[in-house]
Image (cartoon, rainbow, N blue to C red):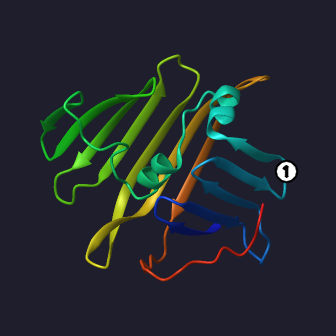
Amino acid sequence: MVRSAFELKKDSVLWFTMSPGMGMEAIRGFFTQERIQIRDRIGNENINLTYDEFEKFYGLKLSLELFQNVLWANIPYEFDYQDRLLRVGKKFELTQVRNNVRYFSKVDTSHGKVSELVSNSLDDRGSVLASFPRFQDASSQPFPAEVLFKLAYQIPEGSQNTIIHLEWTSIDPNSESLSFPFRF
């Protein structure tokens, strides 16, 4: 079982660490408005790129706002007149196109959160699938209790797929100042 911790200062920084247990840190990440920084302490492969550099290298269009929205099961972007929204049973299906990326979200009508998200770059270089099967209550708000991410992206050697399964055991929203325990 992989343990992870996330801290987020809204619209400013997202910090996370993942550990396979026994006090050993496997991966740490630090996302700001400008950069993606990920240190793989086991594989010794590090990413320290701007979002534009990341997109050129991996074919995935990302931003801090998008990370925040996907992590908390919110729709990728605020609803706009150009978006397509349909009600299908107990879900809404929302299609949004922004910055050459198509986002297809299934939004649960009972709590207004995304239960499934598929995004594809229009040039077919990268895609992200996020599935949120369970939610929990935190300060009278629904938050994901579990998420499965599947990332497909390009590297010079060819196509690559990564699957990440996260499970939150607790969520503690607060408005106190955060201090992040490391620098990249």
Q: Is 173 on the left-hand or right-hand side of 160? A: left
Crowdedness of circle 1 by 10 Å Cα count: few (<14), some, many (20+)?
Answer: few
From the viewer's perspective, tell me whether residue 3 is left or right of residue 86.
Answer: right
Residue bearing the label numbered 1: 43
Q: Quadrant of the N terminus?
A: bottom right
Inspect the image, locate mark 1, and give the three-letter code of the amino acid beneath it.
Gly
Viewer can see residue 113: yes
Report whether 155 appears left or right of 152: right
- Vertical side of 156 occupied by 181: above or below: below
Q: Find numbered disc 1 in the image and state the secondary structure of the residue it sits on.
A: loop
Farthest top residue in view: 123
The answer to which of 23 and 103 lies nearer the viewer is 103
Residue drawn at x 57%, y 61% as measured from the top left: 14
Residue at the far right: name it: 44
Residue 64's x, y, as percent?
52, 50
Question: Which corner quadrant holds the C terminus?
Answer: bottom right
Instruction: Choose between 175 and 149: the one closer to the eye.
Output: 175
Across and down, in percent, residue 162 comes to 64, 41
Decide: is 179 above or below 31.
Answer: below
Q: Could you say where residue 28 lies in the image, as x and y percent from the top left?
A: 72, 61
